[in-house]
Amino acid sequence: DQQVKQNSPSLSVQEGRISILNCDYTNSMFDYFLWYKKYPAEGPTFLISISSIKDKNEDGRFTVFLNKSAKHLSLHIVPSQPGDSAVYFCAASGDNFNKFYFGSGTKLNVKP
Amino acid sequence: GAGVSQSPSNKVTEKGKDVELRCDPISGHTALYWYRQSLGQGLEFLIYFQGNSAPDKSGLPSDRFSAERTGGSVSTLTIQRTQQEDSAVYLCASSLARLAQETQYFGPGTRLLVL
């Protein structure tokens, strides 16, 4: 049973517009969330994180929003750039920090 | 500095054979993770090492899977009597410490195909 879900396998956005990637989770014990970006033939690289004590974290063009009541988080990229084209994974961790649960990824295509 | 490296980058094997996958973490990173990504799936946690502590093996899918970490550095994931459903990308990650807040750095993965 997947505890972290990314229901959109792909997303296409025009350069300069906003990209919104969504992620849902089922385990209310999760209290730390991360987004990773993955280019083909490379391992995922850390992008941004958020703790459950916050509902928003911003880093440059990237903002992550957390809605704990809805068990939903989203990653906003604005403005989107062609170099942002990659697969984006969300991940969650709870009181057992050994384990990270990953979504299945959303492939973002930013068109020039 | 050098990142996490994994070898081989690709491995094709016949069903029933054993395979060994290697991970070299970033120097000084005490935590090491193995994940598996099957086609269309997210990263599935397999095993976690932290320093000299006993590893958390709770994610290993069967007793055909085992992993070692020698000297707190290099790790080897072994799959015995491979099955076709073992075909996946196997990713290794390391981090500085045992905290979720510590960023995990991933290697490029080993693509395993079991025929």
Image (tube, rainbow, N blue to C red):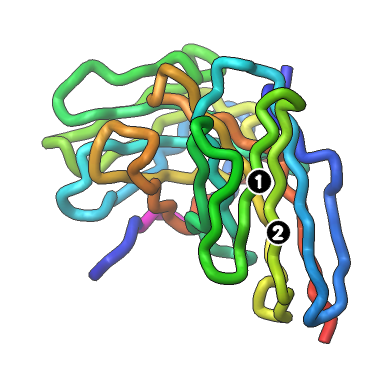
Residue A73 on image: x %, y %: 69, 40
Residue B59 falls within the magenta-colored stretch:
no
Q: Residues within 10 Å of mark 1 (few under 14, many from 20)?
A: some
| Side of B98 where B41 appears, left or right | right
Instruction: Magenta stretch: give its range.
Output: B5-9
SS for callout 2: strand
Residue to which mark 1 is pinned: A65
SS for callout 1: strand
* Vertical position of residue B96 compared to residue A93: above or below: below
Tell me which corner region of the image, top left, top right, bottom left or bottom right, holds residue A34: top right
Residue A95 on image: x %, y %: 43, 17
Q: Residue sitting at 82 percent across and 87 percent down? A: A112
- Is residue A44 something that shows in the picture? no
Q: Residue sitting at 59 percent across and 47 percent down? A: A56
Residue A76: mark in rendering: 2
Q: Residues within 10 Å of mark 2 (few under 14, many from 20)?
A: some
Return the chain for callout 1.
A
**Residue type marked 1:** Phe
Front one among B108 and B20: B108
| Side of A57 where B28 appears, left or right | left
Specify the principal SS of the magenta part.
strand
Front one among A45 and A23: A23
| Side of B95 where A82 appears, left or right | right
Front one among B25 and A112: A112
**Residue type marked 2:** His
Residue B6 falls within the magenta-colored stretch:
yes
Most extreme residue toward the bottom is A112
Q: Are marks 1 and 2 in contact (CB under 8 Å)?
A: yes
Query: Number of labelled discs?
Result: 2
